[in-house]
Amino acid sequence: MSADRGTRTIRTDYLARVEGEGAMYVRLEGGEVTDVKLRIYEPPRFFEALLRGRSFTEAPDITARICGICPVAYQMSAVRAMEDACGVQIDDGPIRDLRRLLYCGEWIESHSLHVYMLHAPDFLGYAGAVEMAADHREVVEQGLQMKKAGNALLAAVGGREVHPINVRVGGFYRAPRRRELAALVGPLEAAREIALRTVAWTATLEFPDVERGPELVALSDPDAYPIDRGEIVSDRGLRFAPSQFGEHVSEEHVEHSNALHARLRGEPYLTGPLARYTLASDRLRPLAREAARDAGLGPECRNPFKSIIVRAVELVEACDEALSLIERYEEPDAPAVEVVPRRGTGHGATEAPRGLLYHRYEIDEAGTILDAQIVPPTSQNQLAIEEDLRAVVAAAIELDDEALTLRCEQTIRNHDPCISCATHFLELTVERS
Amino acid sequence: MERLSLAVWKFSSCDGCQLSLLDCEDELLALAQRIDIAYFLEATSAVVAGPYDVSIVEGSITTAHDAERIYEVRRQSKALITIGACATAGGIQALRNFADVRDFTRVVYASPEFISTLATSTPISAHVPVDFELSGCPINKQQLLEVISAHLAHRRPRVRAHSVCVECKRRGNVCVMVAHGTACLGPVTHAGCGALCPAYDRGCYGCFGPMESPNTASLSAELARQGAQDIDLVRVYRTFNADTPAFRAASEAHER
């Protein structure tokens, strides 16, 4: 790296503490940021191609393998899309509740991992959670305890933590017994307490005072904080059904990335915790809403560094919601409804921990998949992350290369990118001139 | 006590198997006191240069760059352990091995010329010698701890290569195939999951790959007798461990 006044390049070839393989490249010429690239070199795995010719019933298990961190998100978007194609709606009752419960498990697991193991070390100045544990063992241990409660929920409803086996088009293979879920109450109550402390603790961290402007996009569930269903809405008044996704979002293929870049009506946009919170903080359950207020969050949050507080608020929400779902759970008569294939196209959109995940499938009358489109959150967020990087570098240009690189990496981690997901997706290089 | 240095490497994969290490919530900090985590990008930005006592490798080889990189990992590692279906069998992305990857690229990417990829997805063992393979999609984290513990104690890991059927019997599951006529790959599938799917009233779908001596012909005949068509038989063997010799032969036997 050079520090002369001419050209500076800041680069990180292997980003750490993100899921998957990416790199960052920033070029500065005479104090101007001239190029910013989030390079996603994670090799392509061609899911949309290999799904062709498979049965509609196989989509949840196959697409789960796109991401080991948020497999439930893939399963949920897939089953919603397939049910949509087949004219089946599961929008209330115990099966929908169980899906939401399973999804809460994934939010708890993924957000605990990100807050404590990937993101907090940036704020406290450690390379990772294990190094952080040498000085802050109790902090890391409570993060792990909360994460474990999320995993226990995933295992109880889904069969296992990574790539759950119990999800099918139409519902589940076996509905859990009330007593199996009752065993989760203690650990989830403890996790909810930890989540509340996490909100208070993250609010004491130091944050640069920034606000970002990309359009914020999230699902809108009329009755609840958005997780598993809803129309797609933005903070600029856009509202459309998942079936209209293709009319509003275009994907482009650029040379520096194996992830397609998504644009909303031609512009970068942001999905994920900041978008969900800004668009739906009024639908948080009272406990999470109060925790957010006590932490000093207003009804909106556009500071990506503060996403760690928003994730903590969402941890409170997910634990509280899971406990409520368990309390009212009645075992269904059948674990799944019958879904008979028919020729058609189906759309499914749900909220992965890191943002909106959209699936579209076209199937024939036998249920064979003819065409598949999967738009993961990180593809949608990639341009907004690059814009964020550009703004961060412009504001911190006086930093030396090492400090600037760290700041850039943190900027990327603020968005919890999942690179494995987005490949059809990340590398950091900063070049200065 | 002797401390091992551990490196965790990623090739083409979903990150789920290395996540299994972070999912050892009760053991992780204790483990970190026994071993030095020298390279594990998903968990830490601190990187210690090799050589390493043990390398754990996730993912398959799908690019020319990765085919080179795995040699360097092998050169730096006293012991190399592969984890998960991608690293041990090529993974779901090995479905390209049954098709033309150029067609796959055109389906997903508007500008195929930007994409550099190999025509096949291959296990690590196809490129370098591997000291131990742990199968599963994903792996079982208790088995991963056993493999690491065994290395600390200089013994072979206790990982059984018998079928899922044995695990079903031990768990006391009712046989879903005999009792309910549910198609199940348990008789030919490697143990390790604890017979999870049958415990959830579902047939095994083979995510741990073939067991040590799989009689796929016999199982296919029984599945056909229960009503499976050729296309169903091709699909059941052709998932996360599709390009293992046993499952490849079993699927090709029913392809017209």
Image (spheres, grey):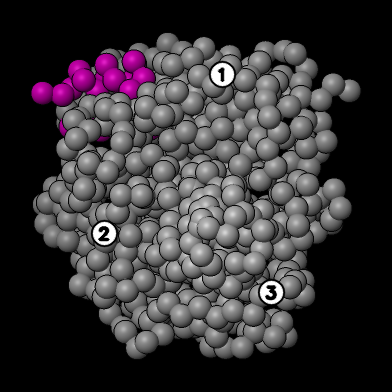
Three-letter amino acid code of the residue under disc 1: Arg
Q: In which chain is the residue bearing label 3?
A: A
**Residue A227 relative to residue A313: left or right:** left
Q: In terms of depth relative to the viewer, which is nearer, B5 or B215?
A: B5
First in sequence: mark 3 or mark 2?
3
Say if B134 sits above or below A30 in the image.
Answer: above
Figure label count:
3
**Disc 2 secondary structure class:** strand
Judge whether residue A164 can be spotted in this image.
Answer: no
Write down the region rendered in magenta: B231-256
Identify the element where label 3 is drawn.
Answer: loop
Residue found 71% across the figure and 49% down from its top: A128
Say which residue label 3 marks: A207
Q: Position of residue B101 (x, y in %)?
A: 22, 33
Mark 3 and mark 2: Cα distance apart in space: 33 Å
Q: Residue furthest right?
A: B1
